Amino acid sequence: MKDVPECYKVLGLEPGSSPERVRRAYIQLSRFYDAARHVDGDPERLSVAQEKKKDIDDAYTEIRRFLPELQGDDGRLETMMEETRDFKEMVRVRPAEVSKPLMAAVIGGALVFLFVWAYHIYSQTRVLPAAPAPISDPDAALAPAQ
C-alpha cells in the first residue's frame, strides 16, 4: 500500500474514520471476501476474492501502524472473527413444507367464511320493494274493466 488515505478507500471509509469503524469495516469486508465463501464458485471469482482479501489485509495493517487504538488487535481480532463466523448461516434451509390438502382446507374454509359473511351483509342491507297500497273498494278491484 502506498499511503494511509488510499488504505481508508480500500476499506470503503473516509480518511480519519474512528478506530471502531475501521475495525468493523475490516471485519465485514474480510468475511465477505473470505475464500471459504467462494469455494463453490468458479476459480476466477475465487482468485479475485483472494486478491481483494489480501488488499484489505494490507490496508488494515497499514492503518494499524498509524492508529494506536488498533495496535493491540493482533490476536484478539482474529479470535473475534472466528468466534462470530458460522458456516451454518451460509447454508440455505428450505422452508417447512405444508401439505396440499391442509392448504386446500384452510383456503376452502376461508372462502366459505367469506361468502357467508358477504351474504349476511347483503341480507342486512337489501332494500325490499314497497308494499302495494291497500284497496278501499274490494268489489271495484274484482270487476272487469269496461
Image (cartoon, rainbow, N blue to C red):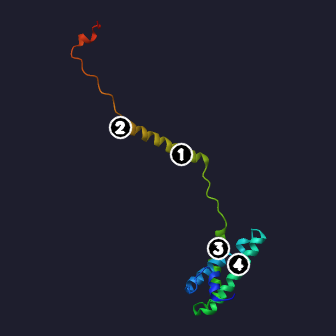
Mark 1 to mark 4: distance in Å? 51 Å
User: Which mark's residue is nearer the viewer, 2 or 3?
Assistant: 2
Provide the residue designation for mark 4.
52
What residue appears at the point 64 percent right and 92 percent down from the top-left corner? Answer: 65
Question: Which tag, 1 or 2, sits closer to the chain's start?
Answer: 1
Provide the residue designation for mark 3.
86
Provide the residue designation for mark 1.
107
User: Which mark's residue is nearer the viewer, 1 or 2?
Assistant: 2
Q: Is residue 126 above or below residue 15?
A: above
Q: Dot 4: within a 10 Å radius of its alpha carbon, few (fewer than 14), some, or many (20 or more) residues?
A: some
Question: For the image shown, how many numbered marks are present on the structure?
Answer: 4
Name which residue type carries label 1.
Ile
Question: Which tag, 1 or 4, sits closer to the chain's start?
Answer: 4
User: Which mark's residue is nearer the viewer, 3 or 4?
Assistant: 4
Name which residue type carries label 3.
Asp
Quadrant of res 132: top left
User: Viewer-proximal residue, 111 or 128?
Assistant: 128
Is mark 1 in CB contact (under 8 Å) with mark 3?
A: no
Name which residue type carries label 2.
Thr
Q: SS of the residue at dot 3?
A: loop
Q: Dot 2: within a 10 Å radius of its alpha carbon, few (fewer than 14), some, or many (20 or more) residues?
A: few
Q: SS of the residue at dot 1?
A: helix
Question: Which tag, 2 or 3, sits closer to the chain's start?
Answer: 3
Quadrant of res 52: bottom right
Q: Position of residue 128 (x, y in %)?
A: 33, 30
Q: Is residue 72 above or below residue 134?
A: below
The furthest residue to the left: 136
Mark 1 to mark 2: distance in Å? 27 Å
Is mark 3 in CB contact (under 8 Å) with mark 4?
A: no
